[in-house]
Structures are given as structure tokens and as C-alpha cells.
Image (tube, helix red, strand yellow):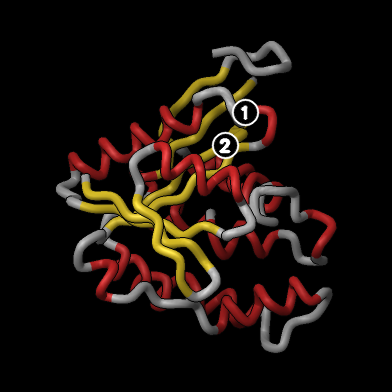
Amino acid sequence: MRAPDGGDVMLRWARPGDRAALGEICLRTGDAGADATGTLVHGELYGLLWAEQYLVLEPTFALVAVVNGAARGYVLAAPDTAAFEALLDDVWWPPLRERYPLPGDGTEVDRRLVAHLHRPLRTPAAVTDRYPAHLHIDLLPELQGRGLGRRMIGAIEQRLTDAGCLGVHLGVDPRNEHALGFYEHLGYAAHRADGTVLFTKRL
């Protein structure tokens, strides 16, 4: 597959050196799929909250789309959400809470992300009992709408299935209408509650 700039798009499993790129992708798609760069001072918070931990804690479930040697999209997953959230509590959140104490500074978005860092949401057992794995995908605009997302979701679903996972879930901002249609098209069932849209699928 060719990228708009003429480079080839390659899918590969992530490497430690992709960490900064994952943070950038997360920031540039963080505002319901749009670029969140201008909305906060500490732009690195997006990657620290929602992307980089997968490369550290679940590296075998991190797939990247690479153009000219640089990651421009990813799909990240954890096969056991409850265990992953416990690991975040043990090793990932504590140093970040020291680095970003409450109530935070910068913009309202900065403070909201810092609050989330100190009080992360827990996935209910009613979800994880039937859909224990979770995933999320972000592609920079130049790679969107070209069938790449479908390929990446298929690859991570297969890896989760090979690991013995029977179900997967994810959350979507209801403002991200493109993502809502994307997951429904891939066979995910939508459940609206608590300001988000939960998607579930049996594997």
C-alpha cells in the first residue's frame, strides 16, 4: 500500500523505539479523532494516558503502521483488561502522579487529564467477564479511509484469538461519528452509556 507522500505503508509489531511516535499519534487524534495539540500545554499526557503503556506492558499486542520508517498509526490491545488495569495501578500511574500532581496546571484539558490520571475509570466486571480484552486504534489523517484500519483490527483480533481471548471491547467518544460507523461496520455492537459508546464483539 502506498501513502499519499509516495512512501510504502508497512504493518509491523511495535518496538521500543516507537514510543515517542505513539504519543504523537495519540495527541494528534486525541480530540474525538481530531488533533488535540492546541488544546493543552502538556501534550504528552495523551500518550501517557492512552498509548505508551501498551508498548511497555503489553508489547506483543501493539501493531503499528509505518511510513518511511516512522509509525503513523497504531492498534493497541490488552488480552486481560482487569489484569492490565491492576498493572497500571502498580507500576504505571504512581510515577506519573508524582510528575503531574493534582489539580494540575495549564488548560482545562490539562487539568481534566491529570484528574483522570489520579482517578482512572475501571472497566466493570459485567464487561470484562464476557469481553475480557480491549483495544483501540488511531491513524493519522493521511492513512485514514483507505482500508488500513480494517486490516489492523483484523490482525490484532487474530492475535487476541490466538491468545485465547473470547471477546473484546473498546470505548469511543460519541462525537467521533466516523469511528462509530467504523466499528459497527466491523461487527461490533454499540452500547451507549455514561457519556461514551461501548463497543463489544465476541471473537
* Residue 23 visible in rendering: no
Name the spot of residue 200 as percent of width and height, x first. 33, 55
Give the residue at the far left of this rendering: 164
Density class for disc 1 (Cα within 10 Å; few <14, some 14-19, many ≥20) is some
Count the numbered circles shown.
2
Residue visible at 43% across and 37% down in the picture: 63
Residue visible at 48% across and 62% down in the picture: 197
Of the 4 image quadrants, the one containing the C terminus is top left
**Cβ atoms under marks 2 and 1 closer than 8 Å:** yes
Closest to the observer: 94 or 114?
114
Up/down of 135 relative to 89, above or below: above
Residue visible at 79% across and 54% down in the picture: 37
Looking at the rendered structure, the secondary structure element under dot 1 is helix
Density class for disc 2 (Cα within 10 Å; few <14, some 14-19, many ≥20) is many
Q: Quadrant of residue 9?
A: top right
| Residue ID for mark 1 | 143
Label drawn at residue 73: 2
Q: Quadrant of residue 115?
A: bottom right
Of the 4 image quadrants, the one containing the N terminus is top right
Name the spot of residue 12 as percent of width and height, x first. 44, 28
